[in-house]
Image: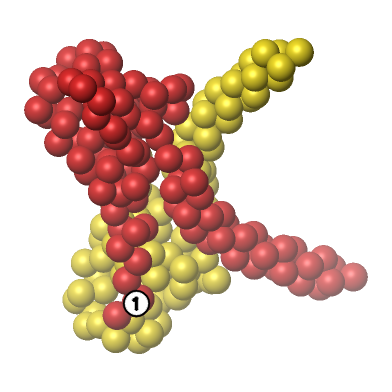
Chain colours: A yellow, B red
Amino acid sequence: MPKRSDSLDRMFSALADPTRRAMIERLARGPANVSDLAKPLNMSLPAVMQHLQTLERSGLVTSRKVGRVRTCRIQPKRFDAAQAWLARQRAHWEARFDRLDAFLEKSED
Amino acid sequence: MPKRSDSLDRMFSALADPTRRAMIERLARGPANVSDLAKPLNMSLPAVMQHLQTLERSGLVTSRKVGRVRTCRIQPKRFDAAQAWLARQRAHWEARFDRLDAFLEKSED
């Protein structure tokens, strides 16, 4: 079995839902409270709270309650791991295509 | 409800598993057949085939059977959508932080 990376599992899993991606798209533009998040999604607060919990478990979003208002924020640094993993795979196949190009050019000489 | 994007759902969902990420890491280095994929994972062929089907449904990997050998390949272009979505969110919050910086600099004048 490959080394588990629960952190990447939770992050990619959190991103695999259109509602949660819409919440992230909103929060990328600035902090928002739960009602702000719920409104454009046309969803109940409990449903939004459930998605928020998944986002918080992934570390992509944090929230803090002051009085009766829970404010949610994106955690930019946590996105680095997901982006870095994707970029690393791309680097591998691009290096392979470069080697293939070099080989084909050499064959043409 | 936000606009569904089944394609992103399937892609991020496919990436949310350490075995499937290990298969992608292997395929990023070059095409491989199912036995090649199974060996380092220490998994049965049927288990690997099941993960392969999830990867194929996401479009991140394709496979082709010639005779008795099924060869799997990464589909680089399909990764663009996932990377583009992440990059777009980053662009939003970076623009916001730039505006905040500009505001703070102006306040200091």
Q: Nearer the viewer, residue B63 or A22?
A: B63
Would you identify the image quadrant in which residue A39 lies?
A: bottom left
Q: Nearer the viewer, residue B88 or A61?
A: B88
> Where is B103 relative to A57, above or below?
below
Q: Position of residue A38 (x, y in %)?
A: 32, 81
> Where is B80 relative to A87, above or below?
below
Q: What residue lies at 18% left-to-right and 20% top-to-bottom?
A: B68
Label 1 neighbour load within 10 Å: few <14, some 14-19, many 20+:
some
Q: In this rendering, would A109 be left or right of A90?
A: right
> Where's the N terminus of chain B, which quadrant?
bottom left
Q: Amino acid at mark 1?
A: Pro
> Where's the C terminus of chain B, which quadrant?
bottom right
Q: Is residue B77 visible?
A: yes
Q: Position of residue A74 (x, y in %)?
A: 47, 60
Q: Nearer the viewer, residue A73 or B25?
A: B25
Q: Is residue B34 visible?
A: no
> Where is A33 relative to A50, above or below?
below
Would you identify the image quadrant in which residue B106 lies?
A: bottom right
Q: Nearer the viewer, residue B49 or A71?
A: B49
Q: What residue lies at 27% left-to-right and 43% top-to-bottom?
A: B56
Q: In this rendering, would A64 be left or right of A78?
A: left
Q: What residue lies at 70% left-to-right and 68% top-to-bottom?
A: B100
> Where is B48 relative to B50, above or below?
above
Q: Which residue is mark 1?
A: B2
Q: In this rendering, would A95 be left or right of B56?
A: right
Q: What residue lies at 49% left-to-right and 46% top-to-bottom?
A: B77
Q: In this rendering, would A81 be left or right of A39?
A: right
What chain letter is assigned to the residue under label 1?
B
Q: Position of residue B29 (x, y in %)?
A: 45, 22
Q: Position of residue A26 (x, y in %)?
A: 46, 73
Local SS, label 1: loop
